[in-house]
Amino acid sequence: MRPRLSTRHGTALLLALLLAAAPGATRTEAQGAGEEQVRKELDLLKEQLRRVEQQMKQQEELIRRLSGEKPGGPAPAPSAPPPSAAAPPPAPAVVDEEALKLKILEELQPQLAAANKTFPAQFNPAIGFIVDTVLSFTSRKDQGNFEFRSGELGISANVDPFVRAYAIINGTNAGGFDVEEAAIVTTSLPYNLTVKGGRFFADFGRLSKFHDHDLPFVNRPGVLDTYIGGESQSDGIEVNWLAPLDQYLTLTAGVYNKVGASNTRVDNTVPRGLEEFTYLARATTFFSLTDAQSIDLGVSNAYTPRVRVNDGGSRNLAGIDLTYRYTPLAAAAYRGLVWGNEFLLNSERQQTVPASDTGPALFRYRDAFGMYSYLEARLTRRYYPGVLFEWVEDLAHPGRVTNAYSPYFTVWASEFQRLRLQYTHLDAPRQRPEDQFFLQWTIIMGSHVHSFRDR
Amino acid sequence: MKRLFYVLVALVALLPANATGARKIRVVATIPDLADMARHVGGDLVQVTSLATGVEDIHAVQMKPSFAVLLNRADVVLLLGLEAEHAFLPALLEAARNPKILRDAPGYIDCSVYVTPIEAPTRIDRSLGDQHPMGNPHINLDPVLGKAMVRAIADGLSRNFPDDAATFHKNAAAYNATLDEAIARWRREAAPLKGKKLVSYHPDMVYFAERFGMEPFGTIEIRPGVDPTPGHIAELKQRMLKEHVEVVVRERHYPAGLAETIARETGAKLVELPAMTGGVPEAKDYISFIDYNVRTMVRAVTGG
Ligand SMILES: [Zn+2]
């Protein structure tokens, strides 16, 4: 046990040197104060050194216990370097401390290794499950329904040093399970690039990339349902670039079979020519107005050169999304305001007259516009009241407008449990106005990421 | 669309990364406490920015895209650790696309590595709240743990820039010596705090309390991150009266009303404290932050 002994030796040396130096130093300083003062200080110093030595002894004891050795073993020859005037006094102690550390680590290593054993299951992905259920009631025919909106399984993990992956598998009251998303995302490409492949929500607009339960209100705005086809679900590939600027700016380019989970214009399962894919471009930026106020702005465009069901005509969907946020820094958890807006313009060849005995179907290009706007306040950590306003033109008959307004009130019992009450007044063309009531109850269990996309 | 693209390309070409001459090490800290320490440890070698300004709730810092830009260019990121930044940092790191500072990369400097957390849960369960899964992360309120954070910063910077390791360690030792002097002074000043029981909104005063001999008695929140229910408040007030709790701390990023009411109804002193450097104008750096907290608490307890 060489380190132990040299430790003791080093301490003794240190003690001797300090004792030798101390009276001299104190004498010059305390010349006028008398010998009493000097003696007191000396005693204090001695006491401190005694404590240091005691601590070292305790450390020795620890090593002995760790190594299972009995005290009082054979004592090897002291190995500390001979005292020399040139060497700084604390040096031997430092050297010994290093040796001591090494020795302790050496003794601990087998236990550490045992404790650090990995098991195959430790590579399992993070798993989360969401239950989203809605009680709805409509004035039309006075009917209600317990709607099991989704039981959503989310799993995610790093795959290797280069990519991560995630999947969202969703079961609904429509029956069966659906792979909503299953995507591979690069993590370490150079030049600020990220590539995404598989099935995922294409980077169009803002709320079309939210899963149903993440929406700020009960239902997806009508304009997203009819123009995009609900969630912007797509099978394809997407490249996203963060511009190396002081100003936040990202650009996305993507190619997909089609965009939109319930977009029925294109068959997702059969191969198609290059002109039948959908091509997307998007740019987003961010402005800080003050510490507390900011604006997120995005423009998106999805272009399909040829849509078979539209007599081979093209389709273009353009969108602008603008989100204003007021979040006082010192009260971000319980105060704030969000004003979210999206405007969409759809241009496509629409069938105006169906085929009949007298002639073929007639098609014409139609431009249709739709939007939604919502304002949501954060009153406390729990209470988020808001109101949603919608205005949507029919895709084939732009003159026919559906509008709706929906006041709602969200209560967050905790970060993982939410209750929401909503009333919707819906005014659709050629129909009697309809009143709808919703009570939504949503929970998240297990892994949950605060994603940047869902801001 | 085409025109927009050309405009963007032109913009990018006109504004190249503004790096010229001997570049300083770009340090991004999540909170100003770490930023101040990094300035002391890094000296002239570093250029430090902080994401939070100090007035925020560390568990609810807003994810601003401009933070992604800062992190994108960072050489290292300093975080308090123990999942304190869970609400914003992981997502920002993903958006920042900077492989140097991803979790477990050398540039990801967790400043809690030399701290043994207290209140480490024996089981991870959301019925216990979700904000402190690794134990209590509010280590920055205890200056002795502050020294451990300084050491973690020096070691982290050295790991990334070994050529300057000697400088970092020398600076860290000097700063920690200054902290040691201040700690000795704070201990003297804090003598009247001994044995005083305190209730705070969130359990972020525990390290401070333990350091200066106070007893953390309870929190207004039910669990870290879960707002109180009326039943919890009633029970808390009753216990406070019975056990003579003298201090109610309202961390300045929590709502004022409830803490005020509880203090008034139990006869306790209401003390408003920042939880980070920069949380009040007086707390302009780490030392003045601890100064402010010690003095404000002592003033409240001694009735000054
Ligand atoms: Zn906390």
Image (cartoon, rainbow, N blue to C red):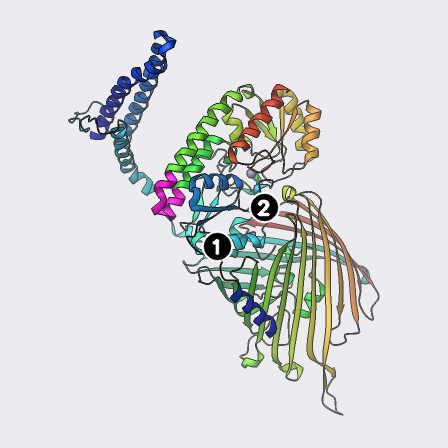
Ligand 1 falls in which quarter? top right
Q: Confirm if mark 1 falls within 8 A of ligand 1.
A: no
Q: Amino acid at mark 1?
A: Arg
| Residue at 55% over, 41% down | B131
Q: Is residue B140 depicted above or below B269 in this figure?
A: below
Q: Is residue B165 magenta?
A: yes
Mark 2 belongs to chain:
B
In the image, the segment drawn in magenta is B155-169
- State the residue position of label 1: B73
Judged from the image, the secondary structure of the residue bearing numbered disc 1 is loop
Q: Is residue B9 visible?
A: yes
Give the label on residue B61, or none: 2
> Does residue A117 appear in this view?
no
Task: Using the rendered view, name the quadrant where residue A357 is placed.
Answer: bottom right
Percent x, y of residue B188: 50, 20
Between B203 and B178, the one lying in front of the other is B178
